[in-house]
Image (cartoon, helix red, strand yellow):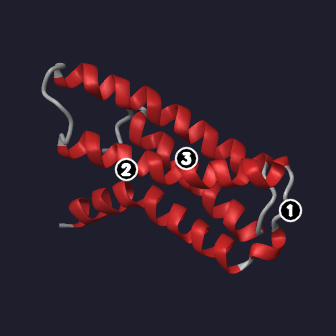
Amino acid sequence: MFETTLSLLWLLAPAICAAIAWWFWVRNRTATSPGWRSRAFIFGLVSAPVNAILLVFEYFGCTSTTAPRPRKSMTFGNIGVVLCIAAFAGASAGEGDGRAQIFLSISAAVGFFLWIPIGIL
């Protein structure tokens, strides 16, 4: 029971942190300026939820069955890692609410662990 709850929390952590980052960003829109840093932060805010959605498609097998399972997983993993890098770059280079940047960075860092094959899950 505890392991299942912990695994579910680990799978949902990037999406939860991205949602919290969105919430902080929407609440404090005065912190953004119309420059490139604001666009970088918005790009990071978009990349983190797309990474979580990609994980759901890969995890539940909502893709076509034309390619073998390991091949699809490798492709999704490569795209997911690039999205995590984009989210982290948006959080570090972007200009926004400090709390939103922290949660976006946490979402990107935890998102890496979903795609890198280590012994956590």
Q: CA distance from mark 2 to mark 3?
A: 10 Å
Q: Which residue type does callout 1 highlight?
A: Ser
Give the residue at x 61% y 46%.
87
Q: Residue furthest bottom?
A: 27
**Quadrant location of the C terminus in the rendered image:** top left
Q: Which mark is residue 113?
A: none
Give the residue at x 62% y 57%.
104
From the top left corner, tell me how far across and down residue 81 is, in percent.
50, 33
Q: Disc 1 vs disc 3: Cβ atoms closer than 8 Å?
A: no
Looking at the image, tell me whether mark 2 or mark 1 is earlier in sequence order.
Answer: 1
From the top left corner, tell me how far across and down residue 83 is, in percent.
53, 38
Looking at the image, tell me whether mark 2 or mark 3 is earlier in sequence order.
Answer: 3
Q: Which residue type does callout 2 highlight?
A: Ile
The residue tagged 3 is 47
Give the residue at x 67% y 54%.
42
Q: Which mark is residue 53?
A: 2
Secondary structure beneath label 2? helix
Q: Nearer the viewer, mark 1 or mark 3?
A: 1
Q: Is residue 12 above or below residue 93?
A: below
Q: Which residue type does callout 3 highlight?
A: Ser
